[in-house]
Amino acid sequence: MSGNWTEQHIPDQRGRVAIVTGANTGLGFETARMLAERGAAVVLAVRDVDKGRRAAARITGDVTVQALDLTSLGSIRSAAADLRAAHPRIDLLINNAGVMYTPKQTTADGFELQFGTNHLGHFALTGLLLDRLLPVPGSRVVTVSSTGHRIRAAIHFDDLQWERSYSRIGAYGQAKLANLMFTYELQRRLAPHGTTVAVAAHPGVSNTELTRNAPAALRVPVTWLAPLLTQKAEMGALPTLRAATDPAATGGQYYGPGNRGEIRGYPKPVVSSPDSHDRAAQQRLWTVSEELTGVTFPELAPQRKAS
């Protein structure tokens, strides 16, 4: 398409159901707001329900709140059960929530916090809701990654939970790389069904609360340089919204800001790292994620040939 893709390009979303994780602030809030203003029924899937309700009150449209703690498989299963009961169909699942550069911590299930929240939590949620998406033509799973998937990033299959040593930057890179690998492997498994697609996006460098856990050495310069290096959350949400709503978007695409370095700018298709396209690693990560979460994707199992 010619020109810059903006909020005005979001098609009419009336009749569509969108679930946005981490939607009470920042990028998730702006994503939810714009979808609701275009007519979607939007669910803010958030850890803090009170904050979610305050966020919902600031949005015009059909907005509800669902408790979801991505650091707990029990909470994820409970939320998925609630969402399945409330919504016979889901058009958009936007895996937006995340944590960044946290000190060494674990989830309720013993996973390293960044990997457990950003990847495993969304992997489990997607698997538990997939049968609400598959029957819906044009449905999408959009997972938010980061340019951090290139920084000191690898899938450490020999120490996924960083038990031997811990790098908050390396752990974040692993989690964001996992988001992309999950998207690409999910798309391959979805393709034969022809209804649902998996797309990824990243916001560039946006001025949100996500960097609150950054080491002081990073946080100080970011604070001073924020006006020059970052963009507002409304702009940072546009790659996700384009991935979710652009009729021209296809499965396996990755959207990010279009300016040099993908730091800021209007959204366009971008290219992820060579590591993110390692199919053997994608498949291995998928298998390990199923084992760790106990969530499988039976709808995507290979179809047996009739005898």
Image: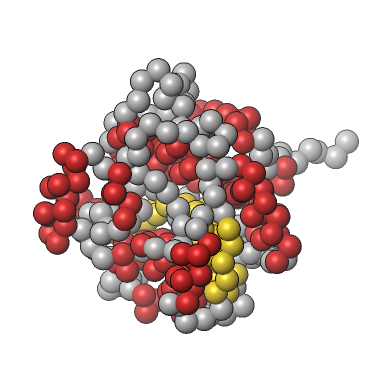
Q: Going 28% across and 49% down the picture, which residue do you hit?
A: 211
Q: Going 23% across and 62% down the picture, which residue do you hit?
A: 231
Image color mode? secondary structure
Residue 36 appears at what percent x and percent y? Answer: 49, 76
The image shows residue 44, relative to residue 164, as above or below, that is: below
Residue occupying the far front of the picture: 50
The image shows residue 216, relative to residue 37, as above or below, that is: above
The image shows residue 107, relative to residue 29, as above or below, that is: above
In the rendered view, does 22 fall on the left or right side of 69?
left
Figure quadrant of residue 18: bottom right
* Front position in the image: 219 or 128: 219
User: Is any atom of residue 185 visible in this view?
Assistant: no
User: Is any atom of residue 80 visible in this view?
Assistant: yes
In the rendered view, does 50 fall on the left or right side of 85?
left
Location of the N terminus (image quadrant)? bottom left
In the rendered view, does 188 fall on the left or right side of 151?
right
* Front position in the image: 209 or 245: 209
Residue 264 appears at what percent x and percent y? Answer: 23, 59
